[in-house]
Each structure stands twice: as structure tokens, then as C-alpha cells.
Image: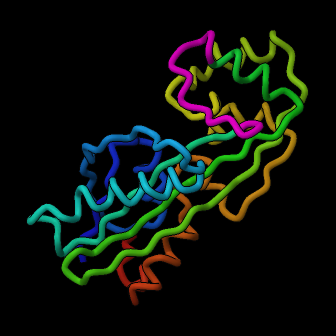
Amino acid sequence: MKIILASSSSYRQTILKKLHIPFTCVTPNIDESSVLGETISDQVERLAKSKALAISTKEANVNSYVIGSDQLASFNGQVLGKPGDFATAKQQLLMFSGQTVTLYTGLCLVHSAKNQLAHIVETFDVTFKTLTEGQISTYLRIEQPYDCAGSFKCEGLGIALFESLDGRDPNTLIGLPLIALMDLFKTMSVDLFDYMQS
């Protein structure tokens, strides 16, 4: 069985390695623009599907299981992208102080030759401590999470920013919900335990 992660994200690769299954990575080349009137949930679902289909429909990959994933953060109904720089990240974290941010992760599994497609959207709520500018600046200086939606890395020092976490799978925070992924494989009659290696 061949599995492809349709992503160039080192974070998602690290998460998928937790399952001890062999996989390769291929970067999808898709338009990630939002669509007018689309909900956040619909957007991450569409983009996860687009990523998986962009890879699975290539002739060399039609007999592979292709995983697509996309994540957006939302605060008070506003979509939050990757900050890109210190100033934007600081502004985001100041807004989040004492508040809750919801992460939406779209996940799609496709096998083109078998004409199989399954998808799900997982949410995860992160409630932040009341933070000072100094605490935020220290965090940003050390972690530099400028390529992360919401300006934090929960798998690192970002955990120090949080009051509480609420969701089914902590891997959702990093962009690849493994519990849901195993569920999607199960809907396609694949037991990943049969492919795990030490």
C-alpha cells in the first residue's frame, strides 16, 4: 500500500510519522484563495480535497492513498492566516489574550483508482491566558511562529500561552488529526495497524 501526504509541511510530516506507516510527501500546487461567501469549515474542507485530488489524479499516484489537509484559525468570526512577521504575530497574540481561538482542520483521503474519497473537518478550541506585551514578545523572540496560523506552536513553547485546550485530538492543533485520519482509512476498509512498522 502506498500513502502520499499532499503537503510540504514539516509539521504534518512529523505528525504522520507518529503512526509508523511508510509514506512519501508531494507538494500540491493549488489555488488556496478563499471563495466569497464560503464558511471557514467549507474552505478548509475544499482546500484539503483540492490538495489530495491534485496529487491523486496524477497517473503515477492513482493507486495511492493520498492525504490532504488544510487549517485555518478563527477569532471572533475572523479568519487568521499565518502572521509572517513579528509585528503581525504580536498583534494577533494581544487580541487573543484571555480569549478563545478556534482552529479548523479539513482532512481528506482519496484513492483515485478505487474511486474513494472521504473527508472530515475537525475543530479545536484554544483559550489563552491573560498575557502581557512582555510575555508575548518573549514568546515570539524564542519561538518565531511566523509560519503558523494563529501565531503559536502548541507543540513547543506555545503551550505556555494557553489556559485550556478543548478538542478530540491534540494533533489537530498542528494540522493533521490522526484519530480522524485513522477513521477515514477505516471507512475505506484499511486498518493502518496492518501497515505500522517499528
Horizontally, residue 57 falls left or right of residue 191, namely left
The x and y percentages for residue 91 are 71, 16
The structure's colour scheme is: rainbow
Vertical arrangement, residue 32 with respect to residue 42, above or below: above
- Indicate the quadrant containing the N terminus: top left, top right, bottom left or bottom right: bottom left
Residue depicted at 60% across the width and 55% down the height: 172
Residue depicted at 71% across the width and 46% down the height: 102
- Indicate the quadrant containing the C terminus: top left, top right, bottom left or bottom right: bottom left
Residue furthest out toward the left: 59
The x and y percentages for residue 142 are 63, 18
Vertical arrangement, residue 19 with respect to residue 94, above or below: below
Look at the image and give the residue range highlighted in magenta. 75-88
Horizontally, residue 67 falls left or right of residue 183, namely left
Residue depicted at 32% across the width and 71% down the height: 110
**Magenta includes 85?**
yes
The x and y percentages for residue 8 are 33, 42
Q: Which of the pair 53/156 is nearer the observer?
A: 53
Residue furthest out toward the front: 37
Residue furthest out toward the bottom: 189
Residue depicted at 42% across the width and 65% down the height: 108
**Residue 42 image-quadrant placement:** bottom right
Vertical arrangement, residue 27 with respect to residue 188, above or below: above
**Magenta includes 28?**
no
The x and y percentages for residue 60 are 10, 64
Vertical arrangement, residue 135 with respect to residue 68, above or below: above
